[in-house]
């Protein structure tokens, strides 16, 4: 797999972790900051649909840990997928949110998370086949 | 991607500088140093590398040079970094304002 591109941002938010978590996982609230229209199934493996400036991005929830971490992959039509990881850390004056978005580039446009999932799936199939 | 561009982007601080300049504002080395935070000298060194790769251009404003991003020279990777970085800055700002509204 060729080089990964990565963007990282951190912000200290003046809100409690449970308040931030709600803003990260409630569809109505997500539609006020993540994109223009957001549909999200709030569990690991759940679906994600985000409309951003008229374009639609489809994805899957990879990690869903209450008040700690939300991670998902998403991709626009015709572009490589990227993985977004949002982590929450309680701080004295609120909650620290870190976001990391990583894209896989190159001919096989899959993120590291996608590879892990696919290789994991292959291992399961092989174990079943050997039984 | 040319060697100079690759070398320029290999450093995380320089990538961060590109993201800052991607917001569209031309900035002096002094204001970049304030944002990052780094010494003005370190910023000037990084700007020289970015300039050599044609990733930034400069105009003189008073006694200082003011730097802007040269998007035409950016490789796909740098464009991605600049645009995704700007997207997240905007989203986190909206998240902050949303949380502030809900506190009232």
Image (spheres, rainbow, N blue to C red):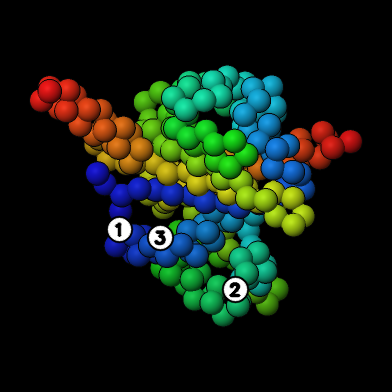
- Are the residues flagged by discs 3 and 1 from a single subunit? yes
Taking the image as shown, residue B80 lies to the left or right of residue B31, namely left
Task: List the residue tagged with mark 2.
Answer: B38
Residue B9 image offset from top left, x and y in percent: 40, 60
Secondary element at tag 3: helix
Q: Earlier in the sequence, mark 3 or mark 1?
A: 1
> Residue A75 lies in what quarter of the image?
top left
**Chain bearing mark 2:** B
**Farthest-out residue, bottom:** B41
**Farthest-out residue, right:** B104
Res. A38 mark: none
Res. B2 mark: 1
A65 in relation to A55, above or below: below
Measured Cα–Cα span from mark 3 to mark 1: 11 Å
**Chain bearing mark 1:** B
**Chain bearing mark 3:** B
Q: Is residue B98 visible?
A: yes
- Are the residues flagged by discs 2 and 1 from a single subunit? yes
Q: Quadrant of the N terminus of chain A?
A: top left
Residue A16 image offset from top left, x and y in percent: 74, 43
**Farthest-out residue, front:** A131
> Residue A26 lies in what quarter of the image?
top right
Q: Is residue A57 visible?
A: no
Mark 3–mark 1 CB contact (< 8 Å): no
Residue at position x 29%, y 62% from top? Answer: B3
Task: List the residue tagged with mark 3.
Answer: B9
Mark 2–mark 1 CB contact (< 8 Å): no
């Amino acid at each position: 797999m060729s080089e990964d591109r990565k963007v990282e941002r951190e912000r200290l938010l003046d809100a409690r972790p449970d308040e931030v978590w709600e803003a990260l996982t409630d569809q109505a609230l997500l539609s006020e900051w993540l994109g223009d229209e957001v549909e999200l199934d709030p569990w690991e493996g759940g679906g994600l649909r985000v409309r951003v400036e008229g374009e639609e991005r489809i994805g899957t929830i990879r990690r869903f840990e209450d008040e700690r971490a939300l991670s998902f992959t998403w991709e626009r039509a015709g572009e490589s997928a990227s993985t977004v990881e949002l982590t929450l850390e309680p701080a004295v004056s609120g909650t620290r949110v870190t976001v990391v978005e990583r894209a896989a580039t190159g001919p096989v446009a899959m993120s590291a998370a996608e590879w892990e999932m696919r290789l994991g799936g292959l291992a399961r199939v092989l174990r079943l086949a050997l039984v | 991607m040319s060697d100079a561009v690759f070398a320029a982007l290999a450093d995380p601080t320089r990538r961060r500088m590109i993201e800052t300049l991607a917001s569209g504002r031309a900035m002096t080395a002094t204001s970049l140093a304030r944002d990052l935070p780094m010494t003005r000298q370190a910023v000037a060194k990084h700007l020289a590398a970015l300039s050599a790769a044609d990733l930034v251009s400069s105009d003189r404003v008073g006694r200082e040079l003011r730097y802007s991003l040269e998007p035409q020279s950016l490789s796909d990777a740098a464009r991605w970094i600049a645009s995704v970085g700007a997207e997240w800055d905007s989203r986190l700002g909206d998240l902050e304002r949303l949380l502030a509204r809900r506190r009232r």
